[in-house]
């Protein structure tokens, strides 16, 4: 069966700087992969590349069987990304946001309700506009949007940051369930104890390259 | 999901945001009104005003439109929503149509207000025969403006210093609309003895323009927005 | 692994100058040198005919001689923008997609802006002579000004950044929309009530020798246009190549960054 | 640290940001130029133009100024720098003066360009006697505008939907400047047979205005910006 | 000697919502206090209040001996805050930013250089504009700005988030030194292991209330 992610000597450039300098990575279906590495190593870039947001300058890059070097839009809608930013509309309420993002990928109303429930946002908060939420509450909302999407490949950039103890447990449970259900998960994180416990494999990103 | 359903989804979202934040109603409308008044001040020069009223209506529309477009994409950029839309695989054509739809709706409201102001402030009269002409002009022009605004708004959205790149890109392109709409409106108002028959050729130009940018945008928006 | 360069990636494999070696090559070739000489000759002819052999105009006197720069530069600007449009189209079509087209488009637009500038300047000078003013809000003048700005905008879009591919796609779209303004300028004299001359050449209102001088001008400007575009296009190609070269250096550093840790 | 040193620090910072991003030079100036062209075309109606040239110069200045002010405070808001400035205990008066200084510098450049354009495009002639008047007008008006812009920019910076709140707040206040500057410039240009002697009373108004907002801003800025 | 922070029944409101609902807190000089608690508990609000950014609605609030209930600007310039956002100018380089923020509080050139050094920003990065930095590199820059300030009271909101292993160690060392030098430190964090080890005392914030 084709690997979920297959990168060979991938180079990616932002503003003339090689954010990825020959990355090789091979991820199988159902894995929970932890990307660790120093600041500026290229973790975020790697995730954005896999999501089809960052063009491939050189090398071979296949995600979910699509050649994203040729057409990086091909893989979209099958992957879900939680980046450093949340991608929420500040003036809309929590439920409006989750509903909108769910709708863009044709998720059912139940999925939406379920994911709100799952992230503990179904109470008073559901009707509060994002602009009046705390940092962690926003992060939870972003996660709820991601959960509602039921993606085949989950890309999470420091998902634990800002979440409280309960939120972290919810998140880890969600990710375990997802991978059990056959989805693949890639997590970039600096919280090695926590994320390490979650991951089925750990690779190190350094200087735009992937080790291990 | 079909492009059209996406468009409706996006448009609904944008209008809901407007509903919650009331930015257009509380701020852009008054702004547009102010612009008209300012013109009146600056040009208050023996009855120049009535003669140039049509031009002013459209100038005011353009400037307010700059604000609207900026706002429309500020919303998408503030927290990386535009990226998220792309990852979600939302068809760019859908995004384009949706945002154009919402923008058009807001523009329409704006123009009606401005037109009424022109009638009141500048004593512009609409010749009975011109009424239909006027309406068609507005529909055609608004559609065109909405498309252009969305197209260039999307292009500038990625760039740094976007709040200033936008006007540079947009103004020369909308110039034809400005001219066309102005002349057509003059014809409708019967300004400087223009008769409404003179207006029709302009409608042609406006429609052509709207169609061009509508099609162009729907097809090309994808490659314009992705950075 | 840098050598692993599938044709689908955005390093420019289409043009010969994509290879770093090209950077040391001059932009001249035998052809362009011949062309350069021809251009020079053409210009000399233009001066001879434009300033000496061609007669004064009945109403405009010697002022009419501006025509021999004014009109050719205007028409060549049209041509340049047309070429930009066409090569942008060629880029957009998958089968013919190549960054060479994008560079030709860019080069042609630059030259076009230059020529449109000449038109504006020569025009305003002429205006001062024959209308007594530098500028008026005549439809042609204004539309010309808009066209000028539009292509400045186009050049700005080319500098928005991103990969060469992104630049090419983005600017191609803008070019295809912008070129639509050209007919607007051309027919503006018909559509609005202008002060500016309308179709006088086409309707043969010029005396034989004047007409000939004008043609000399057009030929000279055409040669100049081709010569400039060829060179600019190659310079652009080298800039792109330089980017790729710079990338190789940067890549080495970036990997070293890893070694330290 | 003395208010004045703070002001210099802030101004230097703002100008360096402009130096790095080149937003004003590359985008606002062309925009201003375009605005002039648009006006001219929209109003091109048997030699209205020369008569209203002074008004147009100032209108164009105002619109470009909106963009400038927006940019000036977008920079502070993007990443919570305004809060940080407050926590750092930077005197609000200093912030105000500093940002006004930078804004004024940029405005001055802008106006010179616009003025030259007016002379070329609208055939506006400066009467010899009017030269001094013109210069003083510009200095007074620019100072006033810089102060108002900063004051209201800061006010809008805190509020949500700022990109649209700003024009609403500012335009009515600067109306007096617009009128004053226009009349004074008309006098300098000798438009509609105005003589430069008529200009001086307006200078008075402009100066008063500048002083008023300069002092007001320096004192009140603190309570305006901190939410 | 007067306590550094003394809050009694402090109530603070944002957009009609009581973000702090009767907070009592007493912090002595030299303490390193950890604020823990669920998302939306009021940690950020508490820190912003101590920094004089959030008006006191009711109750007694003294920071560094100033009554911030009466005049919240009084305490400014003596406290340093690292919030959820970094307060950096995206178009300026790392060193320009740190230099500017240093200058606002009259820090010497050496202090600036030292703090850049301390956060490991003195290499290639020093000349890179913020807009081209990774999330963690931005956070480091923000920390450098804070360090350059030599505040009496350090308020840090989730300072570890986004920092790599080395960065975390740098940070902890810096904070220990600061408190050893007599400064007081308040840290809001969800990384209990890490922050717990650093802190000399832990208080829990829940529903806008604090006890301790
Ligand atoms: C700034 C001022 C002017 C500008 C921007 C300008 C622009 C142009 C342009 C764009 C064309 C090409 C028209 C076409 O074939 O589509 C043109 C042609 C021409 N211009 Fe001008 N022009 C200006 C002033 C003048 C003046 C003052 C005169 C003479 C009194 C003049 C005489 C002509 C003539 C005779 C042609 C050729 C017309 C034809 O056969 O199509 N122009 N000008
Ligand atoms: N601008 C606002 N208007 C109204 N309510 C707000 C606003 N900002 C925050 N709140 C509410 O105030 C409460 C406390 O927010 P605060 O940011 O202090 O929480 P926190 O403890 O920092 O949470 P986190 O751990 O997620 O950062 C939250 O419940 C939030 O909903
Ligand atoms: N827009 C940009 N232009 C140029 N270089 C950039 C840009 N964005 C990031 N970089 C550089 O690319 C490198 C990798 O960035 P990336 O965000 O992928 O790192 P990261 O591993 O996510 O770091 P962190 O752990 O801090 O999030 C960094 O060294 C950064 O300086
Ligand atoms: Mg990152
Ligand atoms: Mg918080």
Image (cartoon, coloured by chain):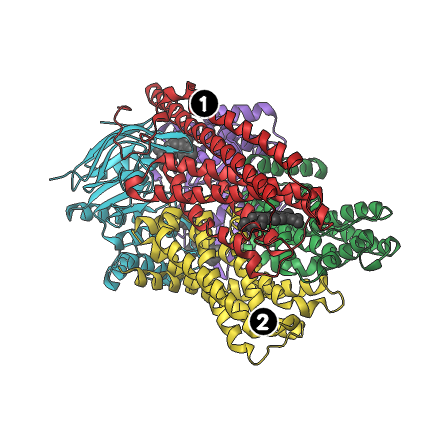
Chain colours: A cyan, B yellow, C red, D green, E purple
Q: Nearer the viewer, residue E138 or B27?
A: B27
Return the x and y of residue B73 as percentages of the image width and height.
Answer: 45, 53
Q: Nearer the viewer, residue C149 or B150?
A: C149
- The image quadrant of residue C44 is top right
Q: Secondary structure at mark 2?
A: helix
Residue A207 visible in the snapshot:
yes
Tags 1 and 2 both on a single chain:
no
Q: Which residue is mark 1?
A: C28
Q: Mark 1 and mark 2: span between their CA atoms?
A: 57 Å
Residue E28 visible in the snapshot:
no
D219 relative to B199 in the view: left or right: right
Q: Secondary structure at mark 1?
A: loop
Q: The numbered mark 2 sits on a residue in which chain? A: B
- The image quadrant of residue C169 is top left
Vertical arrangement, residue B42 with respect to residue A45, above or below: below
* Identity of the residue drawn at 45% across and 34% down: E132
Q: How many marks?
A: 2
User: How busy is the neighbourhood of tag 2: few (under 14 within 10 Å), some, or many (20 plus)?
Assistant: many
* Identity of the residue drawn at 29% across and 24% down: C2
Q: Which residue is mark 2?
A: B187
């Amino acid at each position: 069966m084709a690997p979920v992610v297959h990168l060979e000597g991938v180079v990616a450039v932002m503003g003339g700087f090689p954010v990825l300098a020959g990355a090789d990575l091979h991820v199988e279906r159902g894995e929970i992969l932890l990307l660790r590495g120093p600041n500026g190593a290229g973790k975020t870039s790697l995730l954005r590349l896999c999501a089809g947001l960052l063009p491939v300058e050189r090398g071979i890059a296949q995600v979910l069987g699509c050649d994203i070097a040729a057409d990086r839009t091909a893989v979209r809608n099958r992957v879900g990304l939680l980046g450093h930013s949340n991608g929420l509309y500040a003036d809309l309420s929590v439920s409006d946001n989750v509903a909108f993002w769910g709708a863009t990928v044709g998720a059912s109303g139940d999925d939406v309700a379920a994911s709100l429930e799952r992230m503990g946002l179904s109470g008073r908060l559901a009707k509060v506009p994002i602009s009046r939420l705390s940092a962690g509450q926003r992060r939870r909302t972003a996660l709820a949007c991601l959960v509602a999407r039921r993606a085949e490949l989950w890309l999470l950039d420091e998902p634990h940051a800002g979440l409280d103890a309960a939120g972290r447990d919810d998140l880890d449970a969600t990710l375990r369930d997802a991978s059990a259900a056959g989805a693949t998960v890639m997590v970039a994180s600096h919280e090695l104890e926590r994320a390490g416990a979650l991951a089925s494999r750990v690779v190190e990103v350094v200087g735009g390259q992937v080790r291990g | 999901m079909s492009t059209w359903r996406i468009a409706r989804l996006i448009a609904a979202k944008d209008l809901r945001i407007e509903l919650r934040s009331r930015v257009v109603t509380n701020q852009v409308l008054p702004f547009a009104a102010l612009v008209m008044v300012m013109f009146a001040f600056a040009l208050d020069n023996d009855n120049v005003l009535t003669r140039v009223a049509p031009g002013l209506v459209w100038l005011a529309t353009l400037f307010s439109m700059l604000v609207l477009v900026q706002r429309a994409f500020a919303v998408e950029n503030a927290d990386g929503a535009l990226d998220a839309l792309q990852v979600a695989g939302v068809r760019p054509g859908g995004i384009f149509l949706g945002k154009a739809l919402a923008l058009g709706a807001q523009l329409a409201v704006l123009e009606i207000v401005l037109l009424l102001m022109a009638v009141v402030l500048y004593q512009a009269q609409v010749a009975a025969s011109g009424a239909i002409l006027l309406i068609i002009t507005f529909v055609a022009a608004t559609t065109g403006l909405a498309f252009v605004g969305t197209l260039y708004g999307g292009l500038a959205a990625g760039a740094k210093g976007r709040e200033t790149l936008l006007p540079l890109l947009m103004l020369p392109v909308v110039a034809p609309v400005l001219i066309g709409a102005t002349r057509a409106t003059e014809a409708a108002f019967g300004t400087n003895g223009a008769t409404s028959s003179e207006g029709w050729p302009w409608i042609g130009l406006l429609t052509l323009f709207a169609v061009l940018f509508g099609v162009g945008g729907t097809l090309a928006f994808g490659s314009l927005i992705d950075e | 692994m840098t050598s692993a360069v599938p044709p689908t990636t955005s390093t420019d494999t289409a043009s010969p100058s994509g290879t770093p070696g090209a950077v040391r090559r001059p932009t001249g070739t035998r052809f362009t040198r011949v062309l350069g000489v021809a251009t020079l000759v053409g210009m000399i002819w233009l001066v001879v005919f434009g300033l000496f052999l061609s007669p004064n105009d009945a109403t405009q006197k010697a002022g009419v001689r501006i025509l021999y720069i004014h009109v050719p530069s205007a028409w060549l600007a049209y041509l340049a923008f047309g070429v930009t449009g066409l090569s942008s189209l060629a880029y957009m079509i998958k089968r013919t997609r190549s960054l060479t087209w994008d560079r030709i488009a860019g080069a042609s637009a630059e030259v076009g802006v230059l020529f449109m500038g000449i038109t504006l300047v020569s025009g305003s000078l002429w205006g001062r002579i024959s209308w007594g003013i530098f500028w008026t809000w005549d439809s042609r003048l204004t539309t010309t000004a808009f066209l000028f700005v539009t292509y400045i905008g186009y050049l700005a879009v080319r500098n928005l950044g991103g990969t060469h591919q992104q630049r090419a796609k983005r600017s191609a779209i803008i070019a295809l929309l912008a070129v639509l303004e050209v007919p607007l300028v051309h027919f503006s004299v018909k559509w609005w009530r202008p002060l500016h001359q309308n179709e006088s050449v086409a309707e043969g209102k010029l005396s034989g020798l004047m007409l000939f001088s004008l043609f000399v001008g057009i030929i000279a400007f055409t040669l100049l246009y081709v010569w400039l575009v060829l060179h600019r296009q190659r310079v652009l190609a080298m800039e792109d190549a330089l980017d790729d070269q710079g990338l190789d250096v940067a890549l080495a550093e970036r990997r070293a960054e890893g070694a330290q840790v």
